[in-house]
Amino acid sequence: MTSSLARFCQFFYVAAGVLGAPGTWQVADGTRHTVDARQDNGFAVQYWANGNANLNWTNGQGGHFMVGWDQQSGGNFVVGKGYSSGDMLVNYTGHFEVWGNAYLTLYGWTTEPLIEWYVIESFGHHNPSDNRNSTCYGTFESDGGTYEVWMKWRVNAPSIIGDATFMQFWSVRTTRRVGGTINTTRHFEAYERAGLRLGTHQPHNMVVGIEGQQGIGSADITVGDLPSGTVPEDPTPTTRTERPSETSTCTGSL
Ligand SMILES: *[C@@H]1O[C@H](CO)[C@@H](O)[C@H](O)[C@H]1NC(C)=O
Ligand SMILES: *[C@@H]1O[C@H](CO)[C@@H](O)[C@H](O)[C@H]1NC(C)=O
Ligand SMILES: *[C@@H]1O[C@H](CO)[C@@H](O)[C@H](O)[C@H]1NC(C)=O
Ligand SMILES: *[C@@H]1O[C@H](CO)[C@@H](O)[C@H](O)[C@H]1NC(C)=O
């Protein structure tokens, strides 16, 4: 593609608001976009932001994306790239820096039952299990580390079928990292052993994503690539402000 045609296409996509197509946007349009994986070189693309979000999102070639944000309280977005939800080895590499609340996660949905599941690889200030309505189910080993399994009820919350009441399953890695392989089968099996039943996996909605809330941050992630060297890991903070009696990690083997 010539550079002038590339410029034209970029202009066209911005003008048309086609956020799933490759390009860069500075956005806060309060809508959710999902794109069929087959429309973008085999990668699903997800972009969602609420009306208070303030971010720049670059949907790169293949599995590459970048995002930068600077948000007040109430700002919230999810961007990411991935595959159809299911059993696979998801590889990713990149950078994630955050001052405030944000998650680096592989996440997806099932229906019947409606479940939102997350593999949390890293986060800023807030550990998602630090919530009065969350329950620990134990730990398991996967992907070169240990993950805690938590469940949390969401009541009348946004979902892929509109506002609904549903469970969130969380695998929270006990050492934060950015890059590696996530064996989804191992996580799904751990939920099963915990008695947490997933439903039917949905096409094109399993993404390595960034969920940004209040704070500042940036991420540059490539899905489908492995890190070239050793990935540094740091212990996940276990302070739980909403659950002060449970500052120790979630225990018991699954
Ligand atoms: C988005 O990009 C614009 C143009 O480079 C810049 O002025 C702005 O500060 C960026 N916003 C965020 C939230 O990174
Ligand atoms: C992820 O990398 C592994 C090798 O470590 C490979 O077997 C697997 O196919 C890769 N997965 C994808 C989706 O590229
Ligand atoms: C816990 O769940 C109840 C409903 O069951 C809800 O009203 C409340 O806001 C939730 N609390 C938190 C901290 O999410
Ligand atoms: C992925 O997890 C499954 C289920 O635990 C296991 O059988 C398989 O060997 C794992 N794959 C890799 C590459 O570790």
Image: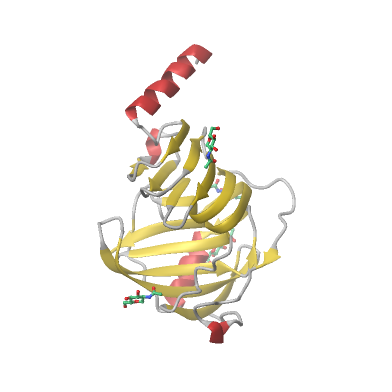
> Where 233 sits versus 219, above or below?
below
> In the figure, 80 relative to 107: above or below?
above
Quarter residue 135 falls in:
bottom left
Q: Nearer the viewer, residue 116 or 244?
A: 244
The residue positioned 64% from the left and 69% from the top of the image is 236
The coloring applied to the image is secondary structure
Identify which residue is drawn at 49% across, 78% down.
Answer: 242
Q: Residue visible at 26% across and 61% down?
A: 163
x, y percentage for residue 58? 50, 36
Q: Is residue 113 visible?
A: no
Number of residue marks = 0
Q: Residue at x 43, y 50 (%)?
A: 77
Ligand number 4: quarter of image: bottom right
**Image location of residue 82, percent across then percent down:** 47, 47
Compared across the picture, whether 85 is left or right of 147 comes to: left
At which x and y percent is residue 113?
29, 67
Residue furthest to the front: 72
Q: Nearer the viewer, residue 13 or 1?
A: 13
Nearest the eye: 178 or 41: 178
Residue 51 visible to an observer of this rendering: yes
- Say above or below: 11 vs 70: above
**Which of the two residues, 239 or 229, is positioned nearer the viewer here?**
239
Up-down relation of residue 173 to residue 87 (above or below) = below
Q: Position of residue 57 (x, y in %)?
A: 49, 39
112 vs 66, left or right, is: left
Res 121 → quadrant? bottom right
